[in-house]
Image (cartoon, rainbow, N blue to C red):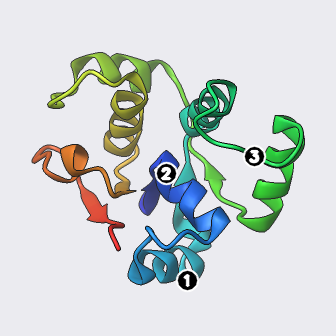
């Protein structure tokens, strides 16, 4: 595989039209949808954020997800044993489980992680692209 794995916040920013997403990142996503991937971990993380009241989504989460997939049809990045094992072994400067799974997914599938997270952008062992506005 080759292409781009969207970090959870990049996916949400793109869907909402948020100003935090750099115009170049927005154009990259629009111009290469067939090469853009989303991890099921981002879906899980979004649900957790909604449950904790950190974000507000319209209506039922399943319905929101269906609508988001219609608006932005990203390729699903498979979550498998190799991704899970790599998430335990990957060298990151922090222990955030979602970030570990996203970094492992990008590594296993040779995807560039599109993120605005400075901790991930500064990680030498990870291919990243800044989405910072």
- How far apart in space, not on screen, are marks 1 and 2 (Cα)? 19 Å
Say which label, 1 or 3, has the lower sequence index: 1
Describe residue 42's horizontal placement relative to residue 71 as left or right: left
- Which residue is tagged 2? 9
- Horizontal placement of 1 versus 92: left or right? right
* Extreme residue in the left direction: 124
In terms of secondary structure, where does tag 3 sit? Answer: loop
Q: Nearer the viewer, mark 2 or mark 3?
A: 3
Q: Nearer the viewer, residue 132 or 36?
A: 132
Q: Is residue 84 above or below residue 2?
A: above
> Tag 2, which secondary structure?
helix
Q: Look at 55% across and 41% down and name the residue there.
A: 39
Mark 2–mark 3 distance (CA, rounded to whole Å): 14 Å
Between marks 1 and 2 in the image, the one whose residue lies nearer the viewer: 2
**Residue annotated with mark 3:** 57
Residue 49 visible (yes or no)? yes
Asked if the residue under mark 3 is in contact with the one under mark 2, i.e. CB atoms within 8 Å, the reply is no
Q: Locate residue 116, reporting x and y percent.
A: 33, 57
Task: Locate residue 92: give its quadrant.
Answer: top left
Q: What residue is disc 1 on?
A: 31
Query: Can you tell which mark lies on residue 122?
Result: none
Q: Quadrant of the N terminus?
A: bottom left
Q: Residue at x 20, y 43 (%)?
A: 119
Between 58 and 97, the residue placed more toward the observer is 58
Rendered residue at 21%/53% (across/down):
121
Q: Can residue 126 be seen from the camera position used here?
A: no
Q: Residues within 10 Å of mark 3 (few under 14, many from 20)?
A: few
């Amino acid at each position: 595989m080759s292409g781009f794995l969207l970090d959870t916040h990049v996916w949400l920013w793109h869907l909402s039209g948020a100003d935090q997403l750099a115009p170049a990142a927005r154009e990259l996503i629009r111009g290469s949808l067939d090469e853009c991937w989303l991890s099921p971990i981002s879906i899980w993380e979004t649900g957790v954020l909604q449950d904790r009241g950190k974000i507000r989504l319209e209506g039922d989460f399943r319905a929101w997800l269906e609508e988001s997939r219609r608006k932005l049809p990203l390729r699903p990045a498979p979550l498998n044993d190799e991704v899970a094992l790599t998430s335990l072994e990957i060298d990151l400067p922090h222990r955030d489980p979602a970030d570990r799974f996203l970094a492992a997914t990008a590594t296993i599938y040779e995807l560039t992680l599109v993120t605005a997270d400075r901790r991930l952008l500064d990680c030498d062992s990870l291919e990243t692209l800044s989405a910072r506005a």
